[in-house]
Amino acid sequence: MTVEVEVSEHLCCGDAIERDEWVDLTCTRWQDPDGRVHVFASYHASRIETRVRGRVVDIISVAEDGLTRPVLRVPSGRALRGLDEDDDGHLEAPWSGETIQDQGRTFVVTVRR
């Protein structure tokens, strides 16, 4: 199951999401005009449509221009805003440890149930 995590939504109060960690995400669904269903992590939706529970097996950062890069983890919203003294909020490539400068606009998190 893939879950889209919008940076603008995550900045408020999202917890860190890490590869190989267990997650329990509250989500909403949206169907685009061609019938494809998208599942979005939601922290404020008045109507939660589904919960996605399982182990994170992949995380991709999607930039404004559509460029995708794998990342090790999605820092918490506090860390992304620079408000977490224990986490600088940087993105990191999963195998090389290379710092990724552009945080992107969306993270696509793959969860194995």
Image (spheres, grey):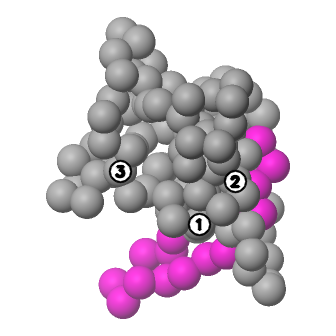
Asked which quadrant contains residue 56, the reply is: top right
The reply to whether callout 1 and callout 2 are in contact (CB within 8 Å) is yes
Tell me if residue 108 is in the magenta stretch: no
Q: Amino acid at mark 1?
A: Glu
Q: Which residue is mark 3?
A: 104
- Taking the image as shown, residue 21 lies to the left or right of residue 24, namely left
Q: Can I make out residue 68 in this image?
A: yes
Residue 63: x and y in percent read: 28, 52
Check the image and name the residue furthest to the top: 96
Q: Residues within 10 Å of mark 1 (few under 14, many from 20)?
A: some
Q: Judge whether 50 appears above or below 76 on screen.
A: below
The magenta span reads: 23-38
Near-viewer residue (5 or 56): 5
- For the residues labelled 2 and 3, the Cα–Cα distance comes to 16 Å
Residue 17: x and y in percent read: 65, 38
- Taking the image as shown, residue 15 lies to the left or right of residue 4, namely right
- Taking the image as shown, residue 113 lies to the left or right of residue 82, namely right
- For the residues labelled 1 and 2, the Cα–Cα distance comes to 8 Å
Q: Secondary structure at mark 3?
A: loop
